[in-house]
Image (tube, rainbow, N blue to C red):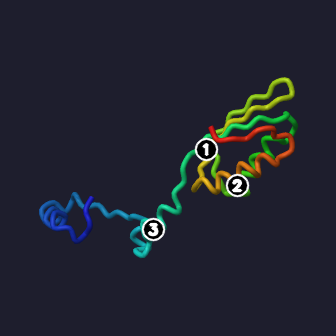
Amino acid sequence: MHRAECKSFVQMARQAPERVLQTDWGDWESEPAVSKKAAASRAVYPVDVMLRARDRQGLLRDVSDVFARDRLNVTAVRTLSRDGSAQMQFTVEVPGIPQLNRTLSAVRDVDGVIECRRT
């Protein structure tokens, strides 16, 4: 890939125009004022979260509601319920540690949750 003003691209485009494909870089091209800092502020990182709770109907929904309210994308869920106890593992995409800490605190407030931590 080359920028349109790249000398190599200009020469190649003259010699082999059939090799030229139009591309679009989304926000980078349409918003030239976007800085690396702004782009980094939109970055998310996968984090594994484990929780233990007293099992009850609606527990998964209530925990999922916390992630949804905090606008965290859940990319994986694994649950195991046995003898009135539930263990859940989530992979969530978070923008940073402060948001993760707020969300974990909110999950701990869900009825029945005994423990919730990053793994």
Q: Which residue is mark 1?
A: 75
Q: Amino acid at mark 3?
A: Asp
Q: Nearer the viewer, residue 45 or 101?
A: 101
On residue 27, the disc is 3
On residue 102, the disc is 2
Q: Quadrant of the C terminus?
A: top right
Q: Earlier in the sequence, mark 3 or mark 1?
A: 3
Residue 87 image offset from top left, x and y in percent: 75, 32
Mark 1, secondary structure of its residue: strand
Q: Earlier in the sequence, mark 1 or mark 2?
A: 1
Q: Earlier in the sequence, mark 3 or mark 2?
A: 3
Q: CA distance from mark 1 to mark 2?
A: 19 Å
Mark 1 surroundings: few (<14), some (14-19) or many (≥20) residues within 10 A: few
On residue 54, the disc is none
- Please tell me whether residue 56 is drawn above or below residue 109 in the rendered image: above
Residue at image coords 76%, 47%: 107
Cβ–Cβ below 8 Å for labels 3 and 2? Answer: no
Locate residue 70: give its quadrant.
bottom right
Mark 2, secondary structure of its residue: helix
